[in-house]
Image (tube, rainbow, N blue to C red):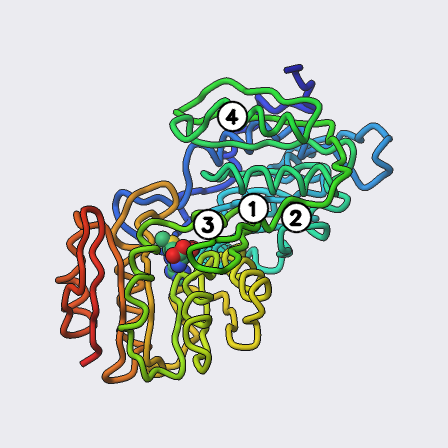
């Protein structure tokens, strides 16, 4: 791995002196004393990228960057580059850049709760309209010279994003990809080296580290995503973009839930696949019941795109519609006869029951009287009481060594 000479004076810029991170909130995402709207990684990424961010980059890619001369105020440090921000949780990367003069900032967040929190934080700070949103792809990275990136947990998401940057960004793009050290592996460096000629691991600081990368290697092949896998046991294809839970594989909890599909409200005309991921549950249900229509919904853009791809791959698009939404916020109250759920147990990298409970509350609101919620969960989670309190009478339908399948009827 070769080092990258960074432009500017990265080491002199203290993001905490430029931007009041304590004003950021996670809302409408779950808020709790042990959950934070920013972390040391955000600040380290901004510190490491400060030199590159201060270089004007609207000219041809081959030209040397023009260093912006600080004017003595706080506005110069992040003023120059066309920037893509990827994986920002609640605005701790985007908002410091736009608040200190960053004029051309493009943002991609996979999760809708993160998008809504960023919008809310931007409004609170008078920074609305200072950045633009794009899906992962050409529009996001075309002409970009700096990428600020909160590294994802999943290697597939890392590979997909690295491919897209290398495919579309400027040849002189610099990537600043940070994470918590406990979630980083050497495999991440190796994966980045497939897409970039230069990759360098920075020093650890406050349990975080930033990988810098440059010299994109333009891929010559078509993108590998969505990944596709044929499942003999289901007789179905499953498709998945990088950020999708379990990828194109079948989660073992999901497999268990699917064993009970025939018992789920047999007369239902319509069902909701809540937290649809790849859309595998929607596809199995639609395939098993030729009359039913299914709404597959998830807060993840990648999941919703995957569910659409899965429906398409199995010729089921006419009976499966996809909706990106945070906990069915836009669904009418009392509108669903049947909801199927394999709930999340993580909020970002933190294991937290709040993510599942939010979906139970959402199901309680959206289910029609007499409607059914079928949930699968790890035995140790003891969700039955929560389901009973929030939805209505809840019975355990089956339990194996690892998972419980519960049926809750809306009272
Ligand atoms: C355990 S995965 C299950 C995925 C898929 N149903 C399966 O069985 O493979 C949970 C899913 O819930 C989604 N999710 C988490 N919080 C959500 C929210 N607030 N609104 C909608 N979906 C959410 C996640 O993005 C993830 O795809």
Q: Position of residue 35 (x, y in %)?
A: 31, 45
Whether pointer 2 and pointer 1 mark residues with C-beta atoms closer than 8 Å, the reply is yes
Q: Earlier in the sequence, mark 4 or mark 1?
A: 1
In this rendering, position of residue 11 left or right of residue 368: right
Mark 2, residue position:
105
According to the picture, the residue beneath numbered tag 4 turns out to be 187
- Name the residue: 33% across, 53% down: 344
Say which residue appears at 35% left-offset and 48% top-offset.
347
Q: Which residue is the site of mark 3?
A: 90
Instruction: State the residue at coordinates (85%, 39%).
Output: 59
For the residues bearing labels 4 and 3, Cβ distance under 8 angstroms: no
Q: Quadrant of the C terminus?
A: bottom left
Q: CA distance from mark 2 to mark 3?
A: 15 Å
Q: Which mark is residue 94?
A: 1
- Residue 101 lies, in percent from the top left, at 65, 44
Q: Earlier in the sequence, mark 2 or mark 4?
A: 2
Instruction: Please state the horizontal and vertical placement of residue 193, each as a whole percent of the image.
Output: 64, 25
Q: Secondary structure at mark 3?
A: loop
Q: Is residue 8 left or right of residue 234?
A: right
Alpha-carbon span between mark 4 and mark 3: 27 Å
Alpha-carbon neighbours of circle 1 within 10 Å: few (<14), some, or many (≥20)?
many
Residue 154 shown left or right of residue 94 in the figure: left
Residue at (32%, 76%) from the top-left corner?
338
Report if residue 41 is visible in the image: yes
Q: Which mark is residue 317?
A: none
Q: Decide if ligand 1 comes within 8 Å of the CB at mark 3.
A: no
| Element class at badge 1 | helix
């Amino acid at each position: 791995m070769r080092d990258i000479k960074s432009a500017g004076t990265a080491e002199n810029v203290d993001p905490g002196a430029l931007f009041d991170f304590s004003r950021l909130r996670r809302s409408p995402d779950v808020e709790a004393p042990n959950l934070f709207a920013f972390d040391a990684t955000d600040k380290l990424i901004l510190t490491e990228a400060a030199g590159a961010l201060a270089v004007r980059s609207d000219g041809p890619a081959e030209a040397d960057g023009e260093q912006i001369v600080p004017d003595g105020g706080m506005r110069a440090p992040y003023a120059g580059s066309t920037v893509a921000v990827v994986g920002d949780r609640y605005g701790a990367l985007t908002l410091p850049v736009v608040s200190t003069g960053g004029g051309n900032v493009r943002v991609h967040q996979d999760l809708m709760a993160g998008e809504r929190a960023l919008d809310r934080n931007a409004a609170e700070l008078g920074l609305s309209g200072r950045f633009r949103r794009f899906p992962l792809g050409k529009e996001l990275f075309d002409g970009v010279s700096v990428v600020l990136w909160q590294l994802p947990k999943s290697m597939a998401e890392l590979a997909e994003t690295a491919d897209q940057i290398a495919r579309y960004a400027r040849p002189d793009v610099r990537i600043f990809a940070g994470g918590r050290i406990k979630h980083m592996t050497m495999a991440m460096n190796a994966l980045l080296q497939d897409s970039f000629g230069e990759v360098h691991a920075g020093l650890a600081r406050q349990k975080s580290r930033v990988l810098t990368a440059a010299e994109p290697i333009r891929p010559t092949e078509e993108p590998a995503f969505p990944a596709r896998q044929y499942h003999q046991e289901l007789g179905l294809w499953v498709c998945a973009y990088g950020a999708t839970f379990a990828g194109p594989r079948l989660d073992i909890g999901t497999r268990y839930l699917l064993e009970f599909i025939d018992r789920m409200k047999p007369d239902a005309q319509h069902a909701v696949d809540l937290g649809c991921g790849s859309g595998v549950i929607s596809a199995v249900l639609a395939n098993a019941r030729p009359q039913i229509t299914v709404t597959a919904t998830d807060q993840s853009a990648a999941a919703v795109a995957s569910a659409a791809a899965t429906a398409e791959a199995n010729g089921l698009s006419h009976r499966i519609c996809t909706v990106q939404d945070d906990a069915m916020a836009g669904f009418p109250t009392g509108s669903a006869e049947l909801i199927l759920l394999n709930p999340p147990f993580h909020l970002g990298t933190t294991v937290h029951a709040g993510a599942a409970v939010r979906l139970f509350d959402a199901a309680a609101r959206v289910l029609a009287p007499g409607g059914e919620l079928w949930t699968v969960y790890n035995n140790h989670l003891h969700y039955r009481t929560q389901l009973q309190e929030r939805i209505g009478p809840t019975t355990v339908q089956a339990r194996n060594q690892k998972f419980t399948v519960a049926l809750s009827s809306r009272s």
